[in-house]
Image (spheres, rainbow, N blue to C red):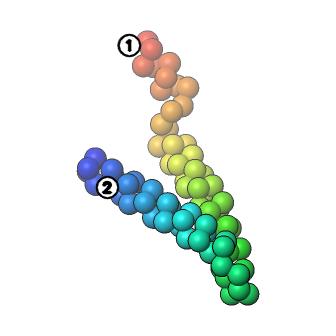
């Protein structure tokens, strides 16, 4: 399971890098269509990490990971 998570994380990082490179390439092409595409890519470049971070926060909150109660119980052991 741990190996699967690492492969999934690496895949997401590679895809995000490709998204950023695509944004960079589209920025230098001058056309009406690419202008719209560029705006969409910029939006995606900003929103995707924010949504991923929000999902991590919700996951930690729902599963109780990283709470102050866990930290204090680990220190008492």
Question: What crowding class fits label 1: few (fewer than 14 Cα within 10 Å), some (14-19), or many (20 or more)?
Answer: few
Chain-order first, disc 2 or disc 1: 2
Front one among 37 and 4: 37
Q: Secondary structure at mark 2?
A: helix
Whether residue 35 is visible to the viewer of this picture, yes or no, is yes
Dividing the picture into quadrants, the one containing residue 25 is bottom right
Q: Which mark is residue 45?
A: none
The image position of residue 39, as x and y in percent, is: 71, 74
Q: Is 14 on the left-hand or right-hand side of 34?
A: left
Q: Which residue is mark 2?
A: 7
Q: Which residue is mark 1?
A: 77
Q: Nearer the viewer, mark 2 or mark 1?
A: 2
The residue at 45%/19% (across/down) is 73
The residue at 47%/43% (across/down) is 63
Vertical position of residue 8 compared to residue 36: above or below? above
Vertical position of residue 63 compared to residue 41: above or below? above
Q: Secondary structure at mark 1?
A: loop
């Amino acid at each position: 399971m741990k190996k699967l998570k690492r492969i999934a994380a690496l895949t997401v990082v590679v895809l995000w890098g490709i998204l950023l490179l695509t944004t960079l390439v589209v920025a230098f092409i001058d056309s009406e269509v690419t202008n719209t595409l560029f705006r969409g890519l910029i939006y995606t470049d900003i929103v995707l990490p924010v949504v991923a971070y929000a999902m991590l926060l919700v996951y930690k909150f729902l599963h109780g990971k990283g709470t102050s109660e866990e930290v204090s119980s680990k220190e008492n052991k």
